[in-house]
């Protein structure tokens, strides 16, 4: 299956329009129930910041940044620079407004598809969150191939994304009761991610599901939200 990227772009541009109507964290986080949103933020922040080194003074590349929900968390914890790369100009505009309102001058939004973003700079942390699930295989491979240009031996790469529990799981324009719209996604296995990153010079240091079994945020039996820490072995 190939995901229609025009549909994906339309989906995220439409999400930007909800900015004034729902909690900021819901726009790109896709959790609209207030109680579940509070639980999600708490559990995810605990897990992600357990995986991350101290971000104080660090340079962070946030690929697929959405409205900057994670970028602002990094800034609040003392990051020196957060480059927030997002291909939806509408989501970027929301993020830039938030950055102005929060006085978060160290958060810089760049409108670009994550797979096409290149620059001659190294980062202390590369953060990829909820990005691959909406991408086709060639896009995912391109990001993995480009990733070494942003890394040196000290770079920490964190991937937080949907994972298929047993075998690759695909949704093709399936109607989501939760979102009240059609949604397409590809959930790849843990082994797929680890092998792909290994081909490009990265070793997984640790990984696990973000939510414990029995958590109400594990909504679908075929998938889980998973987090990985990778280290770059290349030169």
Image: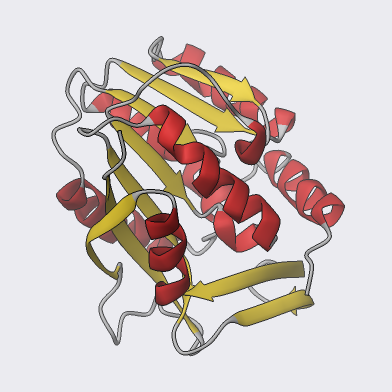
The percent coordinates of residue 123 (x first, y second) are 33, 25
Seen from the viewer's position, the closer of residues 110 and 91 is: 110
- Left or right of 160? Residue 46 is left
State the count of labels. Answer: 0
Which one is nearer the viewer's eye here, 138 or 213?
A: 138
Q: Residue pushed farthest front?
A: 235
Tell me: residue 191, above or below residue 205.
below
| Residue 149 occupies quadrant | top left
**x and y, in percent, of residue 217 in the image:** 40, 74
In this image, 186 relative to 75: left or right?
right
Q: Is residue 156 visible?
A: yes
* Residue 163, horizontal then vertical, whole percent: 46, 73
The answer to whether residue 221 is above or below residue 163 is: below
Residue drawn where x is 49% and y is 12% of the image: 100
Question: Residue at coordinates 31% horizontally, 80% vertically from top-left?
Answer: 215
Residue drawn at 78 percent across, 64 percent down: 3
Residue 180 at least partly seen: no
The quadrant of the picture occupied by the C terminus is top left
| Figure quadrant of the N terminus | bottom right
Q: Nearer the viewer, residue 199 or 63?
A: 199
Q: Residue 26: x, y in percent?
A: 53, 50
Q: Quadrant of residue 232?
A: top left
Q: What colouring does the structure picture have?
A: secondary structure
**Residue sitting at 20 percent across and 33 percent down?**
154
Q: Is residue 69 above or below residue 165?
A: above
Q: Nearer the viewer, residue 126 or 130?
A: 126
């Amino acid at each position: 299956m190939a995901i229609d990227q025009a549909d994906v772009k339309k989906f995220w541009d439409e999400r930007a329009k909800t900015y004034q109507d729902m909690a900021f964290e819901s726009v790109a986080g896709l959790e609209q129930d207030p109680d579940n949103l509070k639980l999600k933020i708490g559990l995810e922040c605990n897990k992600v910041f357990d995986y991350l080194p101290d971000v104080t003074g660090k340079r962070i590349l946030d690929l697929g940044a959405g409205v900057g929900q994670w970028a602002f968390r990094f800034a609040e914890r003392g990051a020196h620079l957060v480059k927030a790369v997002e291909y939806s100009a509408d989501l970027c505009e929301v993020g830039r407004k938030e950055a102005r309102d929060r006085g978060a001058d160290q958060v810089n939004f760049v409108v670009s598809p994550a797979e096409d973003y290149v620059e001659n700079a190294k980062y202390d942390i590369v953060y990829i969150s909820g990005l691959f699930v909406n991408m086709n295989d060639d896009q995912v491979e391109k990001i993995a191939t480009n990733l070494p240009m942003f890394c040196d031996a000290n770079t920490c790469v964190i991937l937080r994304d949907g994972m298929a529990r047993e075998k690759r799981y695909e949704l093709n324009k399936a109607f989501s009761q939760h979102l009240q719209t059609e949604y397409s996604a590809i959930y790849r296995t843990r082994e797929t991610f680890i092998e792909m990153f290994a081909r490009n010079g990265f070793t997984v240091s640790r990984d696990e599901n973000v939510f414990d079994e029995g958590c109400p945020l594990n909504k679908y039996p075929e998938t889980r939200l998973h987090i990985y820490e990778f280290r770059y072995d290349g030169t």
